Image (cartoon, grey):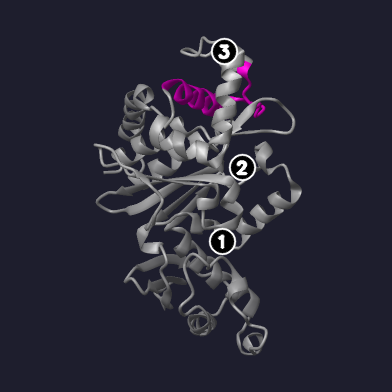
Amino acid sequence: MLTDRQKRIMIAVVEGYTESPNAEPIGSSALSLCEGLDVSTATLRNEMALLEEMGYLEKTHTSSGRIPTEKGYRLYVEELMNIDDIQEELDEQVAQYFENSKLSKKETLSKLVESIVNNKDFNYGTVILEKTAYNSLIKKIEFVYLKNRRGIFILVTDQGLVLHRETSIPEGINIQSIENTMEFLNDKLHDVLLNDFKNAKVINITTDNFFDYISNAPAVLELCLRNIRKLVDDKRTIIGQYNILNHHDFADLNLAQSYIECLKNGDIYQIVEFDAGPIPVIASDDNASISIKLGSENNLEIMKKCACVTAYFKSKHHTGAITIYGPLRMKYRQVISFLKALVNNMK
């Protein structure tokens, strides 16, 4: 059980460290300037040493200051964090943004998220995923020709989700070739996860004579895959995917390369989960549930140095989740308050 002073120290260390532009560890001198910690620096050093023994803080090799551990961040978000002082104002700002927008709720949500996470004070990434796309398997894809070189691409999942996209057919591409290609792809993509479908890498055509019997095969294949990809992407969005590389936590070249590979192969969508499992969820009176996964709690290896904060939304036409992700040194108060405001306006 922490004393009141130790709790105030933890709040000051977490908030001081997450707000530091240069990720400076927090020392006793800095703490002595904080409200409610007007005791000697020697006392503060002793208290921080005790918090380090308890596993909430750790000392870096470059400074005598401390930074929060994963356990320390968990304590902060579950027991110590207070967002009441910023929630009401943020609720009003977000509500005003939705009210003034001429876009759909989903488009408004994406625009607002983009403006926030791309802000230089945050530089986080965001994945927005509709529940109908979560762990869905492709069961059927087809092409229906209309007239005047226009047609509809259709995708059906095992959860009954039916996606369709009307498009124009470029001159030089034979309609029969599209229909033959879609038959070929229907076999190759059967039972492929929507989350895994990213590009032609999921389709093995090396052992097939595909290019022998399809007229203008490369162009036809590209047309079909592009439209299927757009059908899938209609249900999932990623915003600010490269922002995280601006943080010192991802300065290591190998780590940055692993993250970029995670983006390329579509693994990043795995961070959005609709079954939060044993990870505590912050629920509130306004029904805006927030799931927070810190470091080792994340299922994706590259996210084990990150925080993933997920809010679940439900409106008349959309049910899904928004995950904002960034380094463990995240501005949790602002992120959580913002997500709660977003969810409340999606109802």
- In the picture, the quarter occupied by the C terminus is top left
Q: Looking at the image, do the residues carrying marks 1 and 2 touch, with CB atoms under 8 Å apart?
A: no
Disc 2: which residue: 244
- In x, y percent, where is residue 74? 47, 40
Q: Quadrant of residue 70?
A: top right
Q: Identify the magenta region.
A: 4-28
**Which residue: 62% across, 28% down?**
66
Disc number lying in front (3 or 2): 3
Question: How far is the residue under mark 3 from the one under mark 2?
Answer: 32 Å
- Choose the circle earlier in sequence order: 1 or 3: 3
- In x, y percent, where is residue 218? 65, 76
Q: Is residue 279 magenta?
A: no
Disc 3: which residue: 32
Question: How far is the residue under mark 1 from the one under mark 2?
Answer: 16 Å
- Choose the circle earlier in sequence order: 3 or 2: 3
Answer above or below: position of 72 versus 83: below
Q: Looking at the image, do the residues carrying marks 1 and 3 touch, with CB atoms under 8 Å apart?
A: no
**Element at badge 2?**
helix
Question: How far is the residue under mark 1 from the one under mark 3?
Answer: 46 Å
Q: Is residue 335 visible?
A: no
Q: Is residue 176 visible?
A: yes
- In x, y percent, where is residue 141? 43, 77
**Element at badge 3?**
loop
**Element at badge 1?**
loop
For the residue carrying disc 1, how many other residues have a C-alpha within 10 Å: few (<14), some (14-19), or many (20+)?
some
Disc 1: which residue: 266
Dot 3 amino acid type: Ser
